[in-house]
């Protein structure tokens, strides 16, 4: 149903442009394309990544990477995939337009988890045998720092606004909380025995850890950095993920051959779904309709229908898939709105497409910038004075469509475009 809403949005958008006629083409030229959601499965024993078209459940490409690929993180714009190579002590950077490795980054000893920030600027890698986290500038692919955390860090995740990074430390059975402004550990939280996977809700208020030996999930209040609850799940909880609206958490139970479904409102297991043998990684599609589990011993991924909580498909991949982390891309909008000189590298907006909140990072010299947003017809829909480099604005009242922003400050100006889509 959500896919149909998404398609209708684009049909309506095309109709709008048809009504605008010649005036629109004086302003812009448009070519709209929709790149399907894509899943990236790390095949540990094949030293490869299987690329799956989520709409068809067909493996479209196989990409060679480093030795024993383990964790994976897809950038929010869907253009890059980061893969930790546990046996090579590296991270492979995959260009999704070419399905080829564009760069290889040397990190710490035995990297496992990886997480890219929402704005795509920073990458965080957990190094199991170093008990460290590597900080990577995702623009230059250079390691800019190293943070010591608990013993044998495994899963890692960065929150939505990029302010905090959470690391599940396997041997010390705790979570390190890293403040990214200073790249320091500001809290250490005891959780269940031997945490592996970790995820944070979209609103940033809760963190969930999958505790292997405890067969449980620990719920952390991310505001107070205290444990809220412990939820029994299947045998050897491994990977964990949260759906887009934050209402459900899915846990891959490695030795239980199942995926537990947790309601975040009650912190209880509401279903258990049989999947393939030894599921380790688990990821939910951004439209919330499918969950994929990487089944290590089955050499396959199970596709779960989230409405019925049943397996709708099984896809053969490489040898021993793991895919710890977020391995499914978001919708990629190739809007191709041509506007000479309209984009400026000094500004970053995210997410794009946006839903209710638009984050703006601007490098204008004057921090009091005037923001003006107009619709495709040139009508003013939003105006505000921004009082800093980083701002978040409420766009919940805007309808689906393309919008243009214009920032002015101290005789400087920046312009760009973004999409609002409520799917």
Image (cartoon, grey):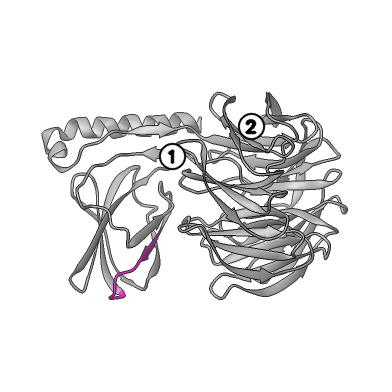
Left or right: 388 as drawn, with respect to 145 = left
Image coordinates for residue 143, horizontal then vertical, percent? 56, 63
- Give the Cα distance between marks 1 and 2: 24 Å
Left or right: 77 as drawn, with respect to 343 = right
Residue tagged 1: 332
Viewer-closest of 46 and 325: 46
**1 vs 2, front mark:** 1
N-terminal-most mark, 1 or 2: 2
47 over 135 or under it: above or below:
above
**Residue 326 shown in magenta:** no
Residue tagged 2: 307
Left or right: 419 as drawn, with respect to 306 = left
- The image quadrant that residue 361 belongs to is bottom left
Q: Residues within 10 Å of mark 1 (few under 14, many from 20)?
A: some
**Residue 361 shown in magenta:** yes
Q: Residues within 10 Å of mark 2 (few under 14, many from 20)?
A: few
Left or right: 206 as drawn, with respect to 211 = left
Element type at mark 2 = loop
Image coordinates for residue 158, horizontal then vertical, percent? 59, 59
Element type at mark 1 = strand
Q: Which span of residues is magenta-colored?
A: 359-367
């Amino acid at each position: 149903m959500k896919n149909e809403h998404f398609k209708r949005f684009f049909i309506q958008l095309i109709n709008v442009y048809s009504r605008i006629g010649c005036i629109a083409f004086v302003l812009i030229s448009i070519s709209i394309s929709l790149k399907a959601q894509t899943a990236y499965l790390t095949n540990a024993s094949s030293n490869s990544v299987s690329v799956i078209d989520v709409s068809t459940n067909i493996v479209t490409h196989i990409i060679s990477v480093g030795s024993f690929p383990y964790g994976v993180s897809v950038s929010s714009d869907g253009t890059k995939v980061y893969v930790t190579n546990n046996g090579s002590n590296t991270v492979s950077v995959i260009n999704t337009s070419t399905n080829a490795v564009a760069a290889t980054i040397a990190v710490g000893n035995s990297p496992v988890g990886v997480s890219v920030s929402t704005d795509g600027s920073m990458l965080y890698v957990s190094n199991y045998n170093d008990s460290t986290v590597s900080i990577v500038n995702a623009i230059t692919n250079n390691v800019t720092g190293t943070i010591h955390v608990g013993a044998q860090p495994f899963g890692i995740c960065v929150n939505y606004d990029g302010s905090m990074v959470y690391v599940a430390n396997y041997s010390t059975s705790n979570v390190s909380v890293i403040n990214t402004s200073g790249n320091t550990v500001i809290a250490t939280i005891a959780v269940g025995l031997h945490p592996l996977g970790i995820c944070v809700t979209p609103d940033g208020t809760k963190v969930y850890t999958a505790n292997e030996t405890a067969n449980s999930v620990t719920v952390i209040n991310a505001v107070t950095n205290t444990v809220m609850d412990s939820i029994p799940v299947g045998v050897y909880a491994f990977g964990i993920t949260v759906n887009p609206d934050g209402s459900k958490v899915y846990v891959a139970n490695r030795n239980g051959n199942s995926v537990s479904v947790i309601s975040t409102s009650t912190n209880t297991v509401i279903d258990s779904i049989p999947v393939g043998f030894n599921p380790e990684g688990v990821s939910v599609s951004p439209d919330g309709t499918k969950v994929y589990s990487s089944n290590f011993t089955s050499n396959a991924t199970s596709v779960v229908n989230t409405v019925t909580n049943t397996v709708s498909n099984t896809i053969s991949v490489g040898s021993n898939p793991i895919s710890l982390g977020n391995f499914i891309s978001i919708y990629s909008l190739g809007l191709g709105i041509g506007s000479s000189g309209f984009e400026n590298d000094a500004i970053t907006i995210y997410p794009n497409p946006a839903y209710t909140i638009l984050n703006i990072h601007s490098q204008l010299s004057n921090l009091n910038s005037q923001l003006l947003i107009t619709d495709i017809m040139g009508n003013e829909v939003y105006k505000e004075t921004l009082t800093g480099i980083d701002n978040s604005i409420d766009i919940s009242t805007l309808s689906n469509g393309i919008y243009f922003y214009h920032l002015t400050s101290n005789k400087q100006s920046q312009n760009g475009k973004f999409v609002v889509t409520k799917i």
